[in-house]
Image (cartoon, coloured by chain):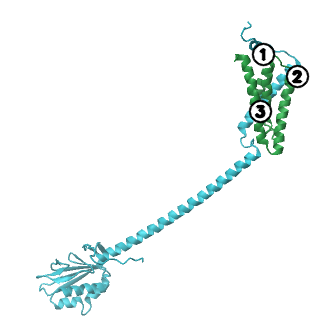
Chain colours: A green, B cyan
Amino acid sequence: MIPALGLLIGLAAGLLLHPAVPLVWQPYLPIAVIAALDAVFGGVRAVMDGIFNDKVFVVSFLSNVVVAAFIVFLGDQLGVGSQLSTGVVVVLGIRIFSNVASIRRHVFNA
Amino acid sequence: MSQTNSPPATSGRRRLMLMARPRATKANILVGLLALLLGFAMATQVHQNQSLELASLPQSDLVTILDSTTLLSARLDQNARELQATRDQLVNGNTSAAAAVSAAKQRLDTLAILAGTAGAHGPGIQMTITDPGGKVTPPVLLDAIEELRDAGAEAIQVDTVRIVASSFFTQGASEIMIDGHSTLQPYTILAIGNPATMFSAMQIPGGLSENVSQLGATITIVQKTDLTVGALHPLVAPRYARPVSATP
C-alpha cells in the first residue's frame, strides 16, 4: 500500500513540478527508469511467489538503476552509447515481460 | 475459500493482499520512498522527452540529422538555382519572342501596303483628271503613276483599282483599263506620300499637269492631310516564282 501510494505521489509531483533534468543525467535517466521498473515488477512477482524480501528488493532496485546507468555511461565512453542503451532496454524489456507473465499466471491462473 | 485446482495462484494473490496492507516497517517505508523516486523519475523523463526533442538525442544522431539537413539544403539550393535560371530564360525568351513578333508585324504591314493587300491612310494628294476628248491614253496615266512613285508615293489608287508593281494599263474600247478593270471618267488618283513633294512633282514644267493640259484635259490636284486608299489588290500566289530560302 505504501509503495503504491509513493509511486502515485511521485508521478503527481513529477507532473506538477516539471523539474528540468540536469544535462549530465539526461542519457541515464530513461535507462534508470526502465531498470527500476524491472526491479518493481520483479518485486511484485517475488511477493506472489512468496519469496519477497525487503532488503533484496531495495538492493536490487538500487543496483539495477546504478548498473544500467553505468552501462550506458560505459557505452558513451566507448562510442557505442546508443547501441548499448538499446541492448539494455531490450534485456530489461524481456525481464519485465517474463515477470509480468509470471504475475499474470498468479492473478489469472493462465 | 481455497480452490482445489490452483492453490498456488490463490496463495499468490493472498500474499499480495497481505503485503498490500499498510505496515509501517522501516523496509516498507524505504520501498515506498524508492517507488516515489521511480514515479517522480518517470514523470520527469516523460515530460523531458516531450519538451526536448533534439536536445535529448545523442551526438551521433545529431550529426546524422545535421548532415541530412545540410544535404537537403544544398539540394534545395541547387533546385532554386535551376528554377531561377529557367525562369530567367523564359522571361528573356518571352521578351525576345515579343520583339520578334512586333518586328514581323511591322514587316507584314509594310509588305501588305506595298503589295496592296491592306488599306492605307495618311497625308497625300487627290488628283482628278477630266478628259472630255478622250485624249488621255494609258501611257499618260502610267507616266502619272511613275511620276508619283518618283515623288515618293507609297500607296496609289486609281478609281477603284489599287496600283501595285504588277498593275498594267491598257486601252479598252473607249476607256482606259487598269488590271483588266475599266475606269470611269473623271479619273481619280489617290496617292499617299509627302503631299508637297508630289504636288510640286505634278506641277513641274513638262510634267503631268502640262501634258494633260496640252491634251485638252483638265486636272485638279488637292493636297490632303489624311486620305484613305481603301482599294485592295487581290493577292495571287505566284505560279512559278518560289522564294529563295534566306538561310542556306
Left or right of A94 in this view: B33 = right
- Asked if one can make out residue A1 in the rendered structure from this viewpoint, the answer is no
Going 30% across and 86% down the picture, which residue do you hit? B150
Q: Which residue is mark 2?
A: A55
Provide the chain ID for the residue under circle 1: B
Q: Is residue B224 or residue B176 the one in the foreground? A: B176
Q: Is residue A28 or residue B138 the one in the foreground? A: A28
Q: Is residue B163 or residue A40 the one in the foreground? A: A40
Label at residue A91: 3
Quarter where residue A85 is shown: top right
Q: Are marks 3 and 1 in contact (CB under 8 Å)?
A: no
Going 70% across and 51% down the picture, which residue do you hit? B67
Residue at the front extreme of this rendering: B5
Q: Amino acid at mark 2?
A: Lys
Quarter of the figure with the N terminus of chain B: top right
Q: Which residue is mark 1?
A: B16
